[in-house]
Image: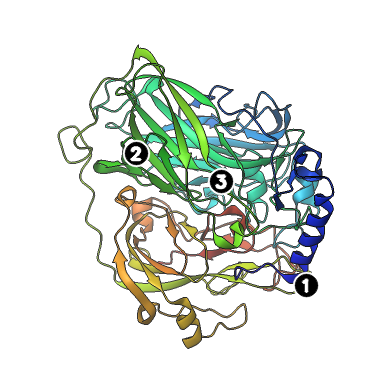
Amino acid sequence: MDGRIPRRSFVRGLALTAGLGAVGVGSASAFPFGIDPLRPFVFRSPPLEPFRDPLPLLPTLGGTSVEVHASSTMHTFHSELPASPALAYGGVDYLGPTIEARVGERTSLVYHNDIASNPLAADVDTRLHGVTEADRTDVATALHLHGGSNPPEFDGHPEHTLRRGQGLVYEFPNQQDACTLWYHDHAMGVTRLNIFAGLAGLYLLRDEFDTGTVGNPLGLPAGEFEVPLILQDKNFTEDGRQSVRSNPLNPQGSWEAATPGDTGVVNGKVWPEMAVARGLYRLRMVNAASFSVWNLFFDNRMRFWVIGAEGGLFDAPVPVDHVRLGPGERADLLVDFGALAPGTTVELRNDEAIPDQVAQRGVLPMPRFCRFRVGAAAGFTGPVPQTLRGGRRQPPLLAPVAQPQIVRNVSVLQIGQGLGQPSPLMSLNNLRYTTDDIEMPRQGAVEQWNIVNATPEPHPIHLHLVRFRVLGRQAVDTAALMSASPLPAVGTRWTPSPDPFTRGPVLSPQPWESGFKDTVIADANSVTRVVVRFPTAEELGFDPDATFGMSAHATDHSGGHTGQAPQPLRGYVWHCHMLDHEDHDMMLKYRLVP
């Protein structure tokens, strides 16, 4: 997208504005489709009273064998809204239970697709790769443990899908550091719909240091003082149904490149409130949005501490007054409510600017998520730990960033398409998902990936199986880069070096990026450099390059359906974790070769 509204869409918008103007500015509730006459290019959720409902605490599953069947449900997002259709895992009516596992103990996750109806059937777009009319009534699913080091057959590959009545026992080795993972759907072309409808949950990996129990060696809050938070933003219709449509210019059933929500949802409730004691809390947080990047802070601007990212704990807590999370990223936080007087309230807020090409429609930042109300009771009164690694009864210090042996340039692009096609095409390396031109790093290799984002908006990039360290970011003159290396037709790799076109200083990783990560925000018109070591089969305990299953989505390389016989699957994927982008077509396969 180049920041301009297509002329046809603009004319349609003017006509819509003229029609709305006849009703009168003072009667927004009379407008169809939740349209605000002052912002006619965006839908508006019904007005809802913030902080009316308590924050739900998701149930917890533990042990070496758990079941998380996916089901059709009815869920009430706010007490002023009626119950509406949703999806969920594990017997709840929205999202899924928090799963607790231990490092070194294999978890068998018994999964079954029991989904009887698709709450977002009308939003299925069969023009996307791998999507057919069957997806409206027979929901394809693929469970992915995001951040897990798992065999390829248990990774939730987007083509390794399960339909109604089918199941699989996923085997997760849990051979990695204690950390915050999350599990969610990953089915080809409908991931954004399935996660939005409710197929997501947290997965907390424990060890002998970070036990999750009272009196743990690290001195961290536990029990009622450790709270998982799944953050989303949503749009709702007047009857309380979830809506993936953000604007009236896009007909229902057509993929949208950006669907920011105007309503904050935490653990399945709109703008909830949580009663907290006076003391330290551990908040395990994930951005589970379809599109939005958030800059999160407390409205009194109080300090808090980040103690870990996706790959586990930092060497020591990092004091901050805000944390920026893109979709798929997690943050492990310590927040001290003990300094606040009883009766004090403090809101978790967001002030991340909306990308220009989305803001021009009238989309505003979603300002809040939830509120905490401080009570009189004493809570966890232990101090913020001075260190988390390297001391007595602590895990070892993080290893220094490895020296890369190979530098690999990859690119993030938005490419216009012709009439009849969902536009723009969201692409990595100027390729479609169906390409055979994929990255094939060697097992045991240490590589630097230069992620060149040549678009006007940020993209959170996620690599399956592996973790990496962030080196830094630098602005790129993308116009000059593209002038020197013109973009070829889609399907031909475009990965020029950004180095001759960098501008300004190298920006160090943010404080909350100081550990290992599996997802990183690649900012607009910049290069984000990360270092990743690709593990060997011996280290993993399985062959990461083994074939498994069969593709259910045989297509030609232009995205069209061919009807060819399914082919064996192999390897993993890397992609943008803006779910709208992942579905079309900002995702590529990769293999770890011996």
| Label 2 – label 3 distance at C-alpha | 24 Å
Residue under label 2: 178
Q: Circle 3 sits in a helix, a strand or a loop, which is it?
A: loop
Q: Earlier in the sequence, mark 2 or mark 1?
A: 2
Q: Is 307 rendered above or below residue 529?
A: above
Say which amino acid is labelled 2: Ala
CB within 8 Å, label 2 to label 1 = no
On screen, residue 432 versus residue 326, left or right, reads right
Q: Circle 2 sits in a helix, a strand or a loop, which is it?
A: loop
Residue under label 1: 419
Q: Earlier in the sequence, mark 2 or mark 3?
A: 2
Place residue 499 in its image quadrant.
Answer: bottom left
- Which label sits in the foreground, 2 or 1? 1
Q: Is 544 rendered above or below residue 120?
A: below
Q: Earlier in the sequence, mark 1 or mark 3?
A: 3
Say which amino acid is labelled 1: Leu
| Label 1 – label 3 distance at C-alpha | 29 Å
Q: In the depicted view, which residue is nearer to us: 35 or 380?
A: 35
Q: Position of residue 556 (x, y in %)?
A: 70, 72
